[in-house]
Amino acid sequence: MKIKQGIRRILLGGCLTGLLLSGGLVLSVGYAEYAEGMEAYRKAWAAYATQRYEEAAGWARRSVAADPENPHSHALLGNLAYLKHDLADAKTQWQKALSLNPQLGLIREQIQQVQIELDLEGKLRPANLGPLTIRIPSGLSPEQTQAILQLLSEALDALEKNFQYRIDRPLTVLIYPAGAFYETTQLPTEVLGLFDGKVRLPDRRTSAGDLAPVLRHEVTHAVVYDLSHGLAPRWLQEGLAQECEGKELQQGRPPPLRDLLGIPNSAGEPVWMSVAVFYPASHSLVRYLLETWGWDRMRAFLKGLGEGRPVEDALASVYGWDLVTLERKWNS
């Protein structure tokens, strides 16, 4: 084990001379394991980045089999387990990654977060819907549970109509007791939901109908994330989420388009924008794009972003206008 750890340190440092002189055979075996593991890890990460999660899991397991001491492969297996809401396995994989590389500070934070969720599991019970894994407060009645599942199914149907896409991957929807939601997320009570790879909602013990727009809003984030491979800018995410939840458009003077899009100013810094301005402006721009060109162009825009195209290029390619023209038309 110590020999393999020494090989890893030297390989990662880019210096092979010492072990070549003292043990070429050991080095060749260790290097082969390391190289095979890293190649599998690169393929796993490429699949993970494009939401091909089953493929990613297969390559990550191959990486660990070839090189059990690669912390990044264990971390990725932890991420994949977390997406499937296998919290215990996620914690185990992340702890292994951290033991192999204590410098992975983010992993330490993830372990703390997953432990909080594990502690909450005793207060939640499963209610599955297709590929979605749902956890709800144990105190909800069967009627309340069924109403939530119905609302979620309707939200998926409505989003599929607009985006021509239905989530067919593991997606976790967590409905916490309200106090636990705000304690866990540290969000202000004005926030009604959160998407951070999972849909998280507080149970406010109101009628099921009050949950419908919040569900549509947060699940829209998951759809936009998938279609853009996580590359959609925040204004587009929030604008589409507000539109799909059915929120009324708020009137107000639009900010400069470059500021809304987050394009840096002459000093190289994006312009700060208050929530009270950002959300209505994002919704206004998305509504304008949809009313002018429809959902086909919006889907093409998301696809372009998912291919890694800069926002300005994708806008010009799909909608045919530069930012100056788009801003003039939007504000007219």
Image (spheres, rainbow, N blue to C red):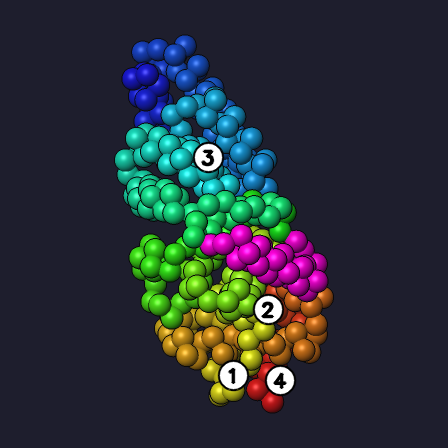
Residue for badge 2: 244
First of labels 3, 4 by sequence position: 3
Is residue 225 depicted above or below 236 in this figure? above
Residue 31, percent from left and from top: 43, 20
Residue density around tag 2, few if under 14, some if 14–19, many if 20 or more, within 10 Å: many
Secondary element at image label 1? loop
Q: Is residue 171 visible?
A: yes
What residue range appears in magenta? 140-166
Residue density around tag 1, few if under 14, some if 14–19, many if 20 or more, within 10 Å: few
Residue density around tag 3, few if under 14, some if 14–19, many if 20 or more, within 10 Å: many
* CB-based contact (under 8 Å), mark 3 and mark 2: no
Q: Is residue 110 visible?
A: no
Within the magenta stretch, is there residue 28?
A: no
The mark found on residue 250 in the picture is 1
- What amino acid is labelled 3 in the image? Leu
* CB-based contact (under 8 Å), mark 3 and mark 4: no
Secondary element at image label 4? helix
User: Which mark lies nearer to you, 2 or 4?
Assistant: 2
First of labels 1, 2 by sequence position: 2
Residue 20, percent from left and from top: 36, 15
User: Which mark lies nearer to you, 4 or 1?
Assistant: 1
The mark found on residue 329 in the picture is 4
Is residue 65 depicted above or below 248 in this figure? above
Q: Quadrant of residue 15?
A: top left
First of labels 3, 1 by sequence position: 3
First of labels 3, 2 by sequence position: 3
Residue 127, percent from left and from top: 53, 47
